[in-house]
Image (cartoon, rainbow, N blue to C red):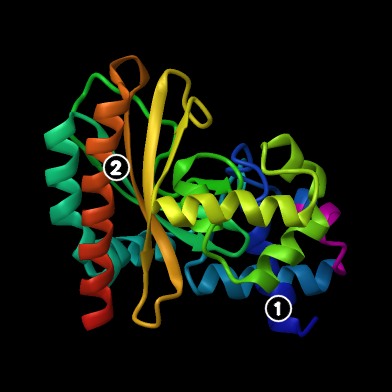
Amino acid sequence: MQSHERMLGILDLFDSDENYVALTFDEIHARVGYTRSTLYRYLKALTDAGLLSSLPGLGYVLGSRIIELDYKIRSGDPLIRAARPVMEELAGRFSGIALLCRKYREHVLCIHQERGTETLQSNYDRGRVRPLLLGAASVAILAYIPAYQLGRLYNRIPEEFDAAGFGKSLAEVKANLKVHRQQGWVVTTGEVTPGVAGIAAPVFDGEHDVLGSLSLTVRESQMTPDKVQRIAEQVVLCARIISNAVAQN
């Protein structure tokens, strides 16, 4: 790797486990294997840029610059700005939690949430990364990724596709995902948060490539086939409104 790639790779250590809030110099050194002098130089550069902060007795934590950038994303991201009004309406209408997710590498990242009730809990908060194979918000994206990306992902983790119920071969996986594409939406129950159902539809960019998904989390016990259908129709409509707004920007 180039030196800048090695330096930025240090930030990935804070991504690898949600318990890694603070890391000491020795912990970072043990994980990356750089010389101590090189690591000191990289950590100083990251600290000077505000991407890391050093706290006595704790070690290194993510820095204030990341918080500043997060505010700018929340207030200025065109996808979030396009989605917020319809998400508020959707969550309020069905007393659920609306989630906006974006494809992130080979995962799915929740980037915005709107609550229509305080009596329902979701484990899919803003900033949390989930696998592409788990939950409606993820599967709604997985069904539309390019064939070469799907094949590459399947070849790496075929057993996980099988465990998630997508099939024992790439052909079976493609056939199952085609069903989701033909329906236009995905519903799952209890895959991310016990006791709740998720109904999701894809969001596309101006080139009609899948960008992310819009989903609504609702209480599983209140779901009937008719209600699932009604919610799904509204989720698809709202996802289409967001896609059109993004395409026009």
**Which residue shows up at 61% across the image and 48% down it?**
176
Q: Where's the N terminus, which quadrant? A: bottom right
**Which structural element holds mark 1?**
helix
Q: x, y percentage for residue 3?
A: 75, 83
Which of discs 1 and 2 lies nearer the camera? The answer is 2
Of 77 and 178, the residue lying toward us: 178
Residue 30 magenta-drawn?
A: yes
Q: Would you say residue 113 is visible in this rendering?
A: yes
Q: Amino acid at mark 1?
A: Glu
Distance of mark 1 from mark 2, alpha carbons? 42 Å
**Which residue shows up at 87% across the image and 69% down it?**
35
Question: What segment carries the magenta color?
Answer: 28-35
Residue 217 higher or lower than 200, as above or below? above
Left or right: 136 in relation to 57: left
Left or right: 243 in relation to 15: left
CB atoms of marks 1 and 2 within 8 Å: no
Residue 1 magenta-drawn?
A: no
> Disc 1 designates what residue?
5
Q: Which mark is residue 161?
A: none
Residue 51 higher or lower than 17, as above or below? below
> Disc 2 designates what residue?
232
Magenta region, main secondary structure: helix
**Which structural element holds mark 2?**
helix
